[in-house]
Image: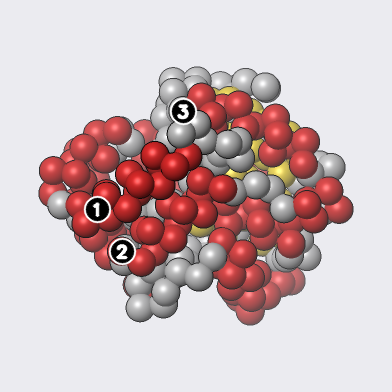
Amino acid sequence: MVLLHGAGTSGWMWTRQIADLAADFLVLVPDLPGHGRSNDHPWVSIADTAALVSEMIAAHAPERRAHVIGLSLGGYVGLHLAAAHPEPVATLTVSGVNILPFPNRGTMKIMGVLMTPLMKWGPMLRANARSLNIPAEDFDGYREAARAMTRQAFRRVSEEALDFRVPAEAGDSPCPVLAVAGGNEHDLIKRSLTGIAAAFPAGETRLVPGVGHGWNGEKPELFTAMIRARVTGDPLPGEFLTV
């Protein structure tokens, strides 16, 4: 399987999932360009990163295929991967992705520019950690991962996320796609679920009550149970609600 992390962090965010899954599965956990150990590689685009992930799966995964799980930025990359490069994707699970137009898009872009110099500032990181419900014991790891992200990647990723739409090729993709959102996430993300699922012939949706955007850290056991179900074909956890 392949675990794709969110913006402003790294493969570190999957620590709890790796600890549970690595004994039973081959788990590939890349740091995306501009992040973590890959911060010497500039972020080009979501499409470029999806192509890199496709190449990684072909090079390292048994039978050149993998179950792909992406959260936030990793979800955007995963959707492009399943649409444009479906061959190596056994299943795709994405969480925390928006495909709808942002209100006040111009203001959002300006805010992104203004926030760039503050992205590694301690008080800003603590505020972000609180908004993501990152457990206190994980803050040091989060801070280290966030500070490894380059400003170039922060700007480019922020701009791309504002305008992301599911590629048209999704309509021809055979990939089983599960789109998930936490019940406490932004309304745009929850409203995006049906559109994501409708874009893929084998798309479906679930809502997870009581969790926010970074719920792999909030409820790691539940997130890991979802991953296991996707890989084995077993039913999803009973807490999940069909949208």
Where does label 1 land, which residue? 119
State the image coordinates of residue 26 (x, y, percent, origin top left).
Answer: 56, 64
> Residue 215 occupies which quadrant of the picture?
top left
Q: Which image quarter holds the C terminus?
A: top right
Q: Can residue 18 be seen by looking at this rendering? A: no
Q: How many angstroms separate mark 1 from mark 3 (CA)?
A: 21 Å
Q: Residue at x 80, y 55 (%)?
A: 169
Of the image marks 3 and 2, the number of the one nearer the N terminus:
2
The residue under the point 73% across, 65% down is 85
Give x and y (percent) for residue 98.
56, 39
Between disc 3 and disc 2, the foreground one is 2
Residue labelled with disc 2: 151
Q: Amino acid at mark 3?
A: His
Q: Position of residue 222 (x, y in %)?
A: 48, 33
In the image, farthest residue toward the left:
122
Compute the Cα span from label 2 to label 1: 8 Å
